[in-house]
Image (cartoon, coloured by chain):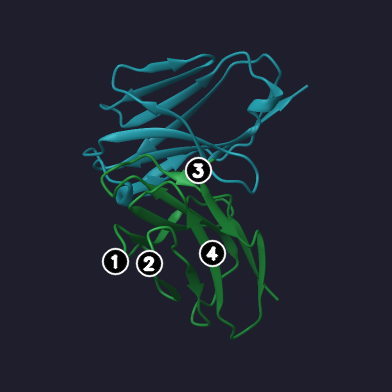
Chain colours: A green, B cyan
Amino acid sequence: DGGITQSPKYLFRKEGQNVTLSCEQNLNHDAMYWYRQDPGQGLRLIYYSQIVNDFQKGDIAEGYSVSREKKESFPLTVTSAQKNPTAFYLCASSISIANEKLFFGSGTQLSVL
Amino acid sequence: RKEVEQDPGPFNVPEGATVAFNCTYSNSASQSFFWYRQDCRKEPKLLMSVYSSGNEDGRFTAQLNRASQYISLLIRDSKLSDSATYLCVVTLSGSARQLTFGSGTQLTVLP
């Protein structure tokens, strides 16, 4: 079955540590996205990628980095510069940037030790 | 003012009840509207798109009021399995880049 796989489901970060969240899709979608969800808040866009080797900052990109070396993969690194990283992170994809229908992964809960 | 506002709830209703949620949006140029359902600590799933003429899918009815800038979701004959958070999503154009998510309305259907 086609879909989006996020791993790990739970992740813990120590102070000053960088951590990387994995996102893989086999839907052959061009566009991929990373969102952050905090309790009682809507999803906020961190980064997005329209196509391989391209990515753009979203609304809250500070303290995060991404890469898009393969069409299937869009990993997110939460750097030590992100002072409040505890949140639920969702990866999504769409056929193209012009298509509004999003397919989501099951999410990663990141917590700070 | 938030771009998309929802009553956070929680709405606690008995099984079989009818419940309605509203969502207001601030940008009158908004073009597309959606309702997503999200279970606790899981991914959002598209419930239905909202069309200008209103649309129905089984027990669910969505309506759009452009003049007052709000969309609504009506759930009839509530089931226990309807318990979830319902997210209102609005976009200015046909681009996922411009999707704006509301913070969600929590629904609990009680036996």
Amino acid bearing label 4: Ser
Amino acid bearing label 1: Asp
Tag 1–tag 3 contact (CB < 8 Å)? no
On the image, numbered disc 3 is attached to which residue? Answer: A2
Mark 1 or 3: in front is 3
Mark found first going from the N terminus, 1 or 4: 4
In percent of the image, x 21 and y 39: which residue is there?
A: B29
On the image, numbered disc 1 is attached to which residue? Answer: A54
Cα distance between the residues tagged 2 and 3: 19 Å
Q: Nearer the viewer, residue A103 or A72?
A: A72
Cα distance between the residues tagged 3 and 4: 17 Å
Using the image, tell me which numbered label, if any, was put on residue B13: none
Cα distance between the residues tagged 1 and 3: 23 Å
In the image, is A98 to the left or to the right of B103? left
How many residues crowd around disc 2 within 10 Å: few (fewer than 14), some, or many (20 or more)?
some
Mark found first going from the N terminus, 2 or 3: 3
Amino acid bearing label 2: Arg
In percent of the image, x 29 and y 47: which residue is there?
A: A96
Asked if residue B102 shows in the view, the reply is: no
Mark found first going from the N terminus, 3 or 4: 3
Tag 4–tag 2 contact (CB < 8 Å)? no
In the image, is A75 to the left or to the right of B33? right
Chain of residue at mark 1: A
Mark found first going from the N terminus, 4 or 2: 4
Using the image, tell me which numbered label, if any, was put on residue A22: 4
